[in-house]
Every structure is written in structure tokens, then in C-alpha cells.
Amino acid sequence: MYAQKAYLGPEASGTITENVKRFSDFLPAQLPLIHPSPRNQIWLKKNPWFTEQVLPALRSRVSKIISEL
């Protein structure tokens, strides 16, 4: 949460989950994510919208950046 508050600034809401849910509010400059840790498997199971909505946006953004190289 400290990193999200530092980088997202006043737009950061109360929890990491809330910020990640609102990922489209931060695009294209930023895309808040959870920490990429195997320990987050429980969080991922509780939040299937992450895999359905956020990961495709992340993949698209990375593909666009790579294509611009």
C-alpha cells in the first residue's frame, strides 16, 4: 500500500484491492497491481475480476510498449 500511495498520490483509495479495481482510472500512465507473489494466490481466488479484467489490460499495455521499441 505504501508504494501505491507514493506513486498514485491522492487518487489512491483506502485499500490495494480498491485501487486495483479502479485500474482504468489510472491508465495510461499507471496500472496499480498487487505484489507478484505466490502468497497472493488466496487474493487472486477471492478476486477473479483481476484475471478477467486487469490482466488483459496489462498484456495489452505491455504489447503496445514492446511494439513501439
Image (tube, grey):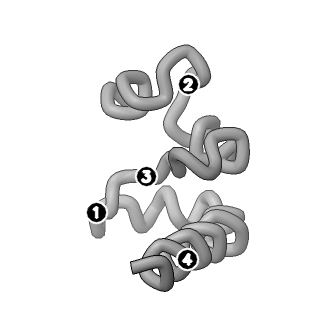
Which residue corresponds to mark 3? 34
Residue found at x 50% / y 37%: 16
Q: Is residue 69 left or right of residue 44?
A: left
Of labels 1 and 4, earlier in sequence is 1
Residue found at x 46% / y 62%: 42
Q: Residue furthest front?
A: 69
Which residue corresponds to mark 2? 12
Q: Residue furthest top?
A: 10
Image quarter of residue 26: top right
Give the CA distance from mark 4 to mark 3. Answer: 21 Å
Q: Tell me the kind of residue under disc 4.
A: Lys
Q: Is residue 27 left or right of residue 34?
A: right
Which residue corresponds to mark 4? 64
For mark 2, give the secondary structure: loop
Asked whether the residues under the numbered discs 2 and 4 touch, taking CB atoms below 8 Å apart as contact, a structural biologist would say: no
For mark 1, give the secondary structure: loop
Q: Tell me the kind of residue under disc 2.
A: Ala
Residue found at x 34% / y 53%: 35
Image quarter of residue 45: bottom right
Q: Nearer the viewer, mark 1 or mark 2?
A: 2
Of labels 4 and 3, earlier in sequence is 3
In the picture shown, does residue 38 fall above or below 27?
below
The label number, if any, that marks residue 37 in the structure image: 1
Give the CA distance from mark 1 to mark 4. Answer: 25 Å
Q: Tell me the kind of residue under disc 1.
A: Ser
Give the CA distance from mark 2 to mark 4. Answer: 25 Å
Q: Is residue 16 left or right of residue 69?
A: right
Of labels 2 and 3, earlier in sequence is 2
In the picture shown, does residue 35 fall above or below 36?
above
Q: Badge 3 local density, few (<14 within 10 Å), some, or many (20+)?
A: some
